[in-house]
Amino acid sequence: MVEGKRPRRLYKYRGFSNLTLTMLVEDVVYFADPTTFNDPLDTKPTLHTDLGGDALEGILSRLIEQRTTAEMSAAAKTIRYRGPKTIDHIARQSRKKAEQLLADIRYNATNPDYEIDDPAQFLLGQYVQEELLRRYDKGVFSLAERANCPLMWSHYGDQHRGLCLGYSVPDTAIGDVHKIRYGGSRLVEASAVSAMLDGDDAARRKVDDGVLLKKARPWGYEREWRLIGPRGEQNSPLELEEVVFGMRCAASVKYAIIKALEKRDRTVQFFEIREQSDSFLLQKRVLDIDELFAYFPRRNRSFDGIFDDLTDRAAETISPIVTAPDAGADRH
């Protein structure tokens, strides 16, 4: 994997939503399927066929057999089929599936409509590339190095109406957090894939980098790191340390999140993003929680009642005007 000096904190920009609240109070993270990423070239390398047809057939056969064996073994485990006969059946079916696909490729390569020098080499490369990507069924939890990036707040923090979660990386999770490399080639060599299948760890890291940890150079502003894990919602292997609120984040959202986390057995620090009057830079400042709590929770009718006592007292102090009777009114 790509090495790099990991920052003290890594940040996840989020809009405020039910999922965000779940991440906070249940301490979970969501590993996204890379096929849903906004960049269609992300995790989509191209195979460089630097090997001959026979070698490519060997790679493709092994990839198919490994995938088919894994799928059938998982199905057998679900229905509790075990034993030597089951293992032997799975192995036979895996080989059969690989042999059938190779036979189809050889047949299709004879199609005269192909206007390339070596149709078989081309088709084998396409199928190896497809199988390689199917092998990487991991999920990705994307993080950033900074909490004060204007573009990140606009693109991923709901235009400052959201928040940014700051995590530290415990020793147990260090091996799963990797830095993105921007620019360069999208190619992954078939020879590296072959070496990976033979158990070469250096080749595996090289292929892993090419598939999971490379992006186009214009995305460099993100300064992205990736936590790799099983797809979907999982217990967080990271440690939540900070919550940073955007410039437009509602005060009620700030209050609700702080209250939701106040009994957490590890203290979380709260910050807010402020503008710098003399530049376009953003600053992270400590949030004044006392000021926030002085206003919330609010009850509207309680404000109407503030003046009730004053009204009653005013009524008591105003004496009615009484006109004294005319002394001579009853005299005739």
Image (cartoon, rainbow, N blue to C red):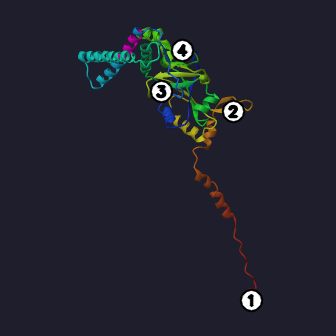
- Amino acid type assigned to the residue bearing label 1 in the image: Arg
Q: Residue furthest front?
A: 112
Q: Which residue is mark 1?
A: 331
Q: Gap between marks 2 and 4, in whole Å?
A: 34 Å
Q: Where on the picture, by quarter, is residue 124?
A: top left
| Image quarter of the C terminus | bottom right
Image position, residue 242 (x, y; %): 57, 29
Q: Secondary structure at mark 2?
A: strand
The 10 Å Cα crowd at callout 2, few under 14, some 14 to 19, many 20 or more, is some
Report how far apart the C-alphas of labels 1 and 4 lie in the structure. 116 Å
Dot placed on the residue nearer the N-terminal end, 2 or 4: 4
Q: Dot 4: few (<14), some (14–19), or many (≥20) neighbours within 10 Å?
A: some
Residue, disc 3: 35
The CA distance from mark 1 to mark 2 is 86 Å
Up the image or down, 184 lies above or below 165; here it is above
Give percent across and percent down for residue 267: 54, 29
**Residue 275 numbered tag:** 2
Q: Is residue 204 left or right of residue 7?
A: left
Which mark is first along the chain, 1 or 3? 3
Q: Earlier in the sequence, mark 4 or mark 3?
A: 4
* Magenta stretch prevailing secondary structure: helix
